[in-house]
Structures are given as C-alpha cells and as structure tokens.
Image (tube, helix red, strand yellow):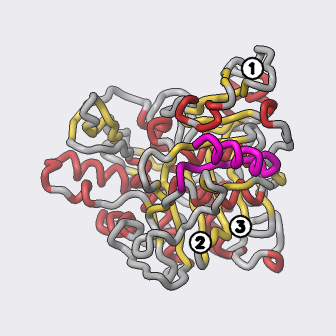
Amino acid sequence: MPLLHLSLPPHRLLLVAGGRRRRRRLLLLPPSPRRVCVRAAASVELEVAAAAGEYGLPFPSERAAHHRELAAAAAAVERACRLCVDVKRSLLSGEKKIFEKNDQTLVTVADFGVQALISLELQRSFPSIPLVAEEDSASLRSSNADNSSNVLVESISSAVADNVSNTNSLLTHDDVLRAIDKGGKDSASFDSNPATYWVLDPIDGTQGFSKVDDTLYVVGLALVVNGKVVAGVMGSPNWASDTIANRKDDSIASRYDRGILMIAHEGCGAWTKRLYDEFGQFTTSKDTWNRCFVDSCSVVHKARYCLSDNQTWNMIPLSVVFNSTTDESKPRDENELLTSYVFSGSLCKYLTVAYGRASVFVLKARTKSLKSWDHTVGVICVQEAGGQVTDWRGEPLDLEADLTGRRDIYPHGGILITNGVLHNKLTELIKANY
C-alpha cells in the first residue's frame, strides 16, 4: 500500500556564490502549494528492501566482506539522488529573490539535505561507524542570518522528510541539524590507530547542480577500513546514457535516458545501473546491473584526457612534451593529445574514467592538501573498474595522513587517474617534467 506523506515546505532556497568577493547568496523561491504526495510504488519497494537489508547488489554476500554496508550505502545514495532532483525541480520553478551572506563557498539546500538524509540512513544500520563529510550546520544555526536561516532549515527539513526511509517518526529541525553535524569537522576525532568510517561528498559539482542545464554532479559515499577504501557508491542524476552521449540526442525524450548509479566493492568490480526507467521514474533496487570497465587504450597520444574546468593544459607537466586540442575531428600526431574540460567536481571525472569515457584525468593540487571527500569514492570505483589512482610520484593516496580528522589528503604534485595501462608511462613523463 503506498505511503502518504504530507509535504508542506514553506520555501525553497539555494545558496550560490556571487561576485568577485565570492559572497554567498541565498536564492529564495516562493512557497510550493500545499499538497499531499503519494510515493510511487518504486519508492515503497525500495523502503521495504532497504529495511530488510535486501537492496539488490550484483554479487553475493559471500564474496563481499562489506556487502551489507554497500547495500545500505547504495540505497541511501539513490534516495539522495531523488532529493537532488526534487530540490532542483522546485529550484527552477518560480521567481527568485536574492539574499547575500559573506562566505567562501557555494552551498545549496540539496547539499545540506543530502548530508542529513544519508547521515540518518547510515545511523539506522551502522550507528557506531563515524561519518566524515563536507558540511556542518554552523551557518544554519547562525543568529546573523535573520529569518532566512530558519526558512532554509525548513526547506532542508522538508526535503529530507520527503525522502527518508523511516516515516514512522516525525523529524524535527534539530534532528536534521544534528544529522548534518554527524559528518561535521567536530563530530569525530581519530588518532593514529586504524579506523572504519564513511566519507561523503553530498554534492560534488555544486556549481553544476545550481545551473539550469544538465551539467554533471555526483553524490559520493565511500567506506574506509584501516586506511583503505573498500566500498563506494556514486550517483549522478544527469549522467547521459551511451545513446545520448554518442548521438548528441537533445530530444525531450532523452531526459528519461539519464542518470546512473555506480557501485564498487573491493575484489568484486565496479557496476552501474540506470536511475530512471523509460517513464522518467526512479527505478527500484531490483534492476539490472552492468559490469563497468575502464577503456583499453594503451597509446599515450591516442588516449582521451580529462581536465578540471578551472585548470589549463599548461598547468600539467605533460604540456612540456605534448600540445593539446579539444577538437575531436582534428587529425592528431603523436605530439598532440585530445583533452576535454568537464564543468563539474572531481568525482565526475573519476566517474568518467571508471565508465570508460576518458582514459586519463590529471589534477594539479593548487594547495598542499585536498579534501578527502572529493576523491575517496572515486578511488575504489576507478580501481575496481580496472584503473589506477596515485599522486604524481606514483604513490597511493594516503587517507590516514590527516591523523585526527581524516578530512585532508596530501598528494605530491597532484593526482593521476588512469585506465591502468597508461599509468606507469604517464607517471614517468610527469615525474620527468614536474
């Protein structure tokens, strides 16, 4: 029997960065009409499966030491993707009003909502495993935000309540704020001893999420055990199917052929499934999984290279040896490489390499440290798809270098993500020219 959930969100908000001073702006959307939402059968089926620990994975529990954790993570990320789609849909409807706050980051209702939702879902099944995540509720609790902060909390709470699996108890605003803070910088303190913990990037590519178009963004969740990533999930609601990607299909019907969920478990491979069915509805947990592999290119100048949109080719050591072009139709010799700039976060590039749409992702570290949530789940997905991830010296990423917080990593030079076949060749080229 479908569950009825009364949804009464007073406002929908978006926080965006604006101007040269990078001030945070709240985009306040008008109230949605009061309505009663009937959850689709797919949602109910997912709830039943998740509650019973039966989220369908493509390999048996006997092969996977963390099968139960991965099943819970996949169910949580799928719910989080629904939240993102719902928030973005409401975000783009109605006239926007803008309020500004001083900040250095860009955050949306969906960032906070996803972190709260996944925190709540994981706490139900694994209350003893800490969460390391990007956001905290400090800005939401700030008294300097006037009434806008309260309205923002209302919007976040409504988004979480619409997607949480446990509908038997009423969620308060404090419940949601505490759930966000479960992943905050003050929630857990580690030491030099081995630890088990989750790492979450609620939305990787928030700038892409805030755009009207179909720019990629990813919800990424990983499980780390004793310094090693053992399982992970990436969900990308805007990921274009092979049909769209290859044919450049811009038809209205093509929007139903988007969305991907990628899972990976140590020793079990990387797998993907669609997020939507042919009617544009989210699929259930029993849908078909497909094994995912990196591409097989073994020639450096014939590979496809993926770069961050905020970095140029001359920032990469390979530029000393090779020219670059973004023109795929242009004939290339062995001195020129094909590059593409993806406007989105780092995890979107990991996803692109793991799926086989790019051979290499090269990232220059602009600061001494990088945030762990921007990379952790990408590592397991690329590795289980057959690829390799190291820093520019060829050393694995040290997830325990930040002894107390596990929030920072310190790669030498930058990060190199490849299909594996090209890794040693490119590592040597980078070391020789860095």
Query: How far from the left and from the top, in percent, is residue 82?
Result: 56, 49
Residue at x 49%, y 80% (from the top left corner): 127
- Whole-angstrom CA distance, mark 1 to mark 3, is 41 Å
What is the distance, in whole Å, between disc 2 and disc 3 at their CAs?
21 Å
Query: Which residues lie in the magenta part?
Result: 412-434
The residue indicated by pointer 2 is: 224
Residue 55, labelled with which disc?
3
In this view, the residue in front, 112 or 208, is: 208
Residue 33, given in percent of the width and then of the height, sits at 37, 39
The amino acid marked with disc number 3 is Tyr
Q: Quadrant of residue 173?
A: bottom left
Query: Circle 3 sits in a helix, a strand or a loop, which is it?
Result: loop
Farthest residue to the front: give it. 432
> Is 380 drawn above or below residue 69 in the view shown?
above
Q: Which residue is mark 1?
A: 328
Q: Nearer the viewer, residue 166 or 133?
A: 133
- Tell me the quadrant of the picture where the N terminus can be found: bottom right
- Is there any visible trace of residue 6 in the rendered image? no
Image: 263 above or below 276: below
Q: Is the Cβ of the residue at disc 2 closer than 8 Å to that at disc 3?
A: no
Q: Amino acid at mark 1?
A: Glu
- Relative horizontal placement of residue 399, taking residue 207 as reference (left or right): right
> Decide: marks 1, 3 in contact (CB < 8 A)?
no
